[in-house]
Image (spheres, coloured by chain):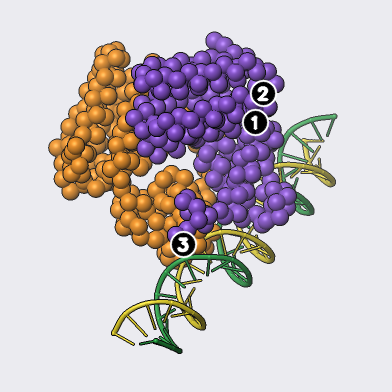
Chain colours: A purple, B orange, C yellow, D green
DNA sequence: TGGAATAAAATTGGATCCAATATCCATTAT
DNA sequence: ATAATGGATATTGGATCCAATTTTATTCCA
């Protein structure tokens, strides 16, 4: 019998660690768009060779967080209005689908756990912490759907969206409150057994978020 | 001015080449599920070192075609009924969305090109060739949607689905004909300007394919 | 003979070294 | 003065070598 039920203690490799660190940095906005991330620099900073750095950059390329060009290097792509539009459009399809699949499996304990995440989210200081809890909420909710592939796709979308979310960390604290309130409302509806109402609320939640992001990013067509 | 409008002559790297070869092999069913793909073996076969092989396997892991375990190796995951169900469910959302977005940009030339692909598909000998043309059709159609992110997600789904499609290469030649006919019908509807009809036909096409695959894979619940 | 302990082989992950290519800068020609 | 050309420098991709770990084979003891 092993300690953690997860049994993932074996998995961590330096390449994965480097990828996690770089991912956090990119999402925190540490690298300017179109600025090359030099393997040697990262390697020295982290005290490893360039090999795991290369693997990490390959991983991040697969996640869409960097673009690599042969013999030139890896860079963080510019944010694109079109991409964020797409992200929210696809989220608008995937998330209701996942919620619907998850609802039959939601236990009172799961609800309690989700409420805790929302509570912690309320007291979040900065956008980075809030975005993390936001991600946690979605993961905890949709993991109950038993749709691992779709969840994986969605998580990639949420990660990409993070870059855009973090851009508006200076303003719109009321947006966070409103978002938390919507999460709570969705939980209420689930608890009441109103599955369709919850799905509808989720759709509106996503649509509202998209509009809000468009507005604060200045592009409201 | 450069020769090819593509300007991608610079891109190919040995890791990418290795990944392409391995991807083709996996989709062709050359590796049994849960059988380890040894880096050294591939490296010797292709006359390269293990480094590009490792990168290729990492890439394929990101595509969901292999699973890697630290110090153990990479293996092709078993086919899962749940996964194929999910693939078709998500396709059922993404493809109509992409088609709707593509329709306004479809020119008569694009239609002609698509018809050519369908024609070639009709004369396809084996399932591998047909699957390739099927992929080509989807790409040519959806690339007009100007939704690169969604197309990327969809292409990954189609690649995963390939493994399941190839399983039924021995039977159901009438399935291929029927599928080609449906493609043609979708093109007809687009040409007639009946966008909604085309989208509806596409939905039915996907749904029908899913049912057919379920049936031939023996799991029709 | 069977099973646990242990040693040997195989395999992957990472570090270092070399090759291929891009970028930058100086020189030169117009 | 400026643009083109050639070479020095920087940087990435790949090969070889070493370390960490797993897997297989062997030995020893009941």
Residue A30 coordinates in the image, percent (x, y): 70, 35
Disc 1 + disc 2, Cβ < 8 Å: yes
User: Do marks 3 and 1 share a subunit?
Assistant: no
Q: Which mark is residue A169?
A: 2
Tell us which disc is closer to us: 3 or 1. Answer: 1
User: Do marks 1 and 2 share a subunit?
Assistant: yes
Q: Which residue is mark 1?
A: A128
Residue B128 coordinates in the image, percent (x, y): 27, 46
Residue farthest toward the top in the current orientation of the protein: A221
Q: What is the chain identity of the residue bearing mark 2?
A: A
B220 lies above or below A193? below
From the viewer's perspective, is A91 left or right of A213?
left
Residue found 53% across the figure and 34% down from its top: A136
Secondary element at image label 3: loop
Q: Residues within 10 Å of mark 2 (few under 14, many from 20)?
A: some
Identify which residue, A48 or C25, lies in the foreground.
A48
From the viewer's perspective, is C24 left or right of A124?
right
Residue A31 coordinates in the image, percent (x, y): 69, 36
Q: Which mark is residue B72?
A: 3
From the viewer's perspective, is A90 left or right of A180?
left
Residue B145 in sight in this render: no
Q: Which mark is residue B184?
A: none
Residue found 63% across the figure and 34% down from its top: A27
Quadrant location of the C terminus of chain B in the rendered image: top left
C11 lies above or below A111? below
* Spatial separation of the CA atoms under disc 1 and disc 2: 8 Å
């Amino acid at each position: 019998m092993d300690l953690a039920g997860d049994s993932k203690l074996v998995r961590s490799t330096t390449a994965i660690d480097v990828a996690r660190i770089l991912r956090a940095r990119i999402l925190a906005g540490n690298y300017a768009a179109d600025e090359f991330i030099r393997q040697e620099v990262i390697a020295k900073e982290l005290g490893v060779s360039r090999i795991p750095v290369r693997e990490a950059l390959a991983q991040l390329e697969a996640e869409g967080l960097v673009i690599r060009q042969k013999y030139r290097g890896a860079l963080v792509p510019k944010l694109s209005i079109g991409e964020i539009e797409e992200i929210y459009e696809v989220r608008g399809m995937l998330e209701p689908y996942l919620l619907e699949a998850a609802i039959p499996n939601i236990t009172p304990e799961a609800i309690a756990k989700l409420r805790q995440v929302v509570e912690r989210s309320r007291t979040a200081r900065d956008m980075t912490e809030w975005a993390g809890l936001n991600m946690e909420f979605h993961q905890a909710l949709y993991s109950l759907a038993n749709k691992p592939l779709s969840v994986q796709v969605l998580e990639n979308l949420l990660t990409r969206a993070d870059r855009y979310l973090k851009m508006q960390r200076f303003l719109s604290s009321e947006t966070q409150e409103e978002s938390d309130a919507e999460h709570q409302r969705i939980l209420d509806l689930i608890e009441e057994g109103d599955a369709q109402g919850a799905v509808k609320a989720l759709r509106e939640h996503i649509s509202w978020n998209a509009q809000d992001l468009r507005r604060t990013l200045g592009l409201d067509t």
